[in-house]
Amino acid sequence: MDLNERNKYIPYRKTNDESIGIAIKKMIAAYGLMDKYMEVSVREIWKRMMGGTIAKNTKKITLRKGKLVIQIMAASLRQELGFAKEKIKIMINTELKEDLIKEVIIW
């Protein structure tokens, strides 16, 4: 029996080559945790984009059904960020590389 005949009978594993990032996202989606994963991602992007001062004055960030709700403790900062809602939405969606956020609510 030569090498080619012998290799016909050896079962081969299916190749499922994909990056670890894609595999983890598939696992998160399979467990139904994608909403929480995206919310945590938005929180991290918020801290990185807005800096320490704004992050310290941010009390709570939630993401539900395309609405990003940001609770700010300082009234003056809340007012300033209220003028920049559209810019915030565009910046976070650009970082996420998808159109996830439809509306930004600041209170």
Image (cartoon, rainbow, N blue to C red):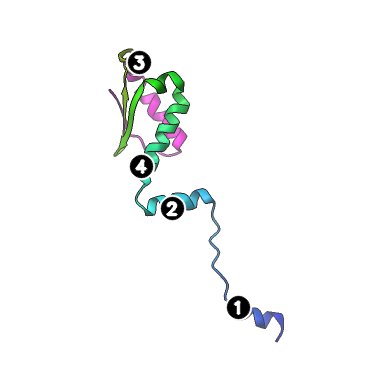
Residue sitting at the far bottom = 1
Of marks 2 and 3, which one's residue comes earlier in the chain? Answer: 2
Q: Which residue is mark 2?
A: 26
Q: Residue at x 57, y 76 (%)?
A: 11
Identified by mark 3, the residue type is Leu
Of marks 2 and 1, which one's residue comes earlier in the chain? Answer: 1
Q: Position of residue 105 (x, y in %)?
A: 29, 27
Real-space Cα distance between discs 2 and 4?
A: 14 Å
Q: Which residue is mark 4?
A: 36
Q: Which residue is mark 1?
A: 10
User: CB under 8 Å between callouts 2 and 1?
Assistant: no
Real-space Cα distance between discs 1 and 3?
A: 67 Å
**In the image, which residues are magenta?**
79-107
Local SS, label 2: helix
Give the numbered dot on residue 49.
Answer: none
Give the numbered dot on residue 77.
Answer: 3
Q: Quadrant of the N terminus?
A: bottom right
Local SS, label 1: loop
Identified by mark 4, the residue type is Lys
Answer few, some or many: residues within 10 Å of disc 3's Cα (few below 14, many 20 plus, some between 14 and 19).
few
Real-space Cα distance between discs 2 and 3?
A: 38 Å
User: CB under 8 Å between callouts 1 and 3?
Assistant: no
Identified by mark 2, the residue type is Lys
Real-space Cα distance between discs 4 and 1?
A: 44 Å
Total marks drawn? 4
Magenta span has 4?
no
Q: Residue at x 39, y 51 (%)?
A: 29
User: CB under 8 Å between callouts 3 and 4?
Assistant: no
* Quarter of the rendering containing residue 102: top left
Q: Position of residue 95 (x, y in %)?
A: 46, 34
Q: Position of residue 14 (x, y in %)?
A: 54, 67
Answer few, some or many: residues within 10 Å of disc 4's Cα (few below 14, many 20 plus, some between 14 and 19).
some
